[in-house]
Amino acid sequence: MIVVAGEQVVDLVPAGEGLLRAALGGGPANTAIAAARLGAPVAMAARVGRDSFGSAFRQRLTASGVDGQYLVATAQPSALALATVDGGGEAQYDFWLAGAADFGWRERELPELPDGSTIHIGSLAAFLPPGADTLERWALRHRDRCTITFDPNVRGVALARPDSLVRLERLVELAHLVRASEGDLTHAYPHVPPMETARRWLAAGPRLLVLTHGDAGAVALTATDEVTVAAPAISMIDTIGAGDTAMGALLAWLHTAGRLTDQLKRELAPETLRLMLRHMCDAAALTCTRPGADPPTLDELRAFQLV
């Protein structure tokens, strides 16, 4: 099973005429839903708020086939984010996170997983203490017998901490697979070309690194190959959830291909990488054709690929 650990966030999104609509999101939760809708067995490890949003989050996960056995009920509130979308459909976020349930992990709340499982960490929960420290130790304990994947999903609120870049580098070294966007690397290292950072990260430990370039496609890097795929042409609504869907699609494809049980030790040939990237880019693109974080099902993705 793939266990996705991280936050769930209530996105307040524009609804016209100055109004806002509450939409359920959070990078890791969106990733879990995307992977499950695309056919992978997924569980979510998250701390759930005491408010009505907490119940809605549970229902959202269950409706998409995400196993909720590792959800932890808390007496704390859910996290909030105000999303603004520019004329090109790009989303930016302002967060209200103080005291939120998502970032207070304790050691006893996280499960011990069987050999061959996959642990996915990332986004705000991987950076904001005290929970981030607990998640990092949990992933490290499992590294030799499980596959660890990481999507930094870099946000300003995470990088504002003085130890953020040190933690980022540690998590990259810990992971067997890293998925990052060009924007992530530019935020973290604004004066370094993203591909230069991607190659440096690959040399630090991961066996596979996938760098996404939005509507310009994506590149997969291994010790022996760099494979690039273009993104499909679409009519853009917004980019909310696109990167999360990309990560979920990547996990689902690798699971279906039987490549997640051994820390990605088997070589991925260039044509295999190309098929993987096409699946990922198509899923992310389809998410951009509808408002909010709404990853496609496998049937929807197959229909999109036939058009």
Image (cartoon, grey):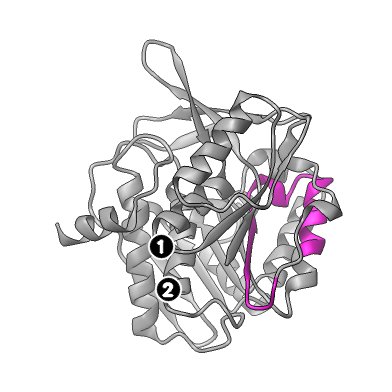
Q: Does the magenta stretch include residue 132?
A: yes
281 within the magenta span: no
Instruction: Give residue 158's quadrant in the image.
Output: top right
* Label 2 vs 1, first from the N-terminus: 1
Which residue is rendered at x = 46% and y = 56% of the image? 36
Query: Quick check: can you spot residue 239?
Result: yes
Question: Which image quarter is the C terminus in?
Answer: bottom left
Q: What stretch is highlighted in magenta?
A: 114-138
294 or 116, nearer to the observer: 116
Say which amino acid is labelled 2: Thr
Left or right: residue 139 compared with residue 252? right
For this view, does 265 lie left or right of residue 89?
A: right
Is disc 2 in contact with disc 1, using a CB cutoff of under 8 Å? yes
Disc 1 element? loop
Tag shown at residue 39:
1
Q: Can residue 94 be seen in this view?
A: no
Badge number at residue 256: 2
Q: In this view, does 170 lie to the left or right of 209?
A: right
Q: In this view, does 9 lie above or below 109?
A: above
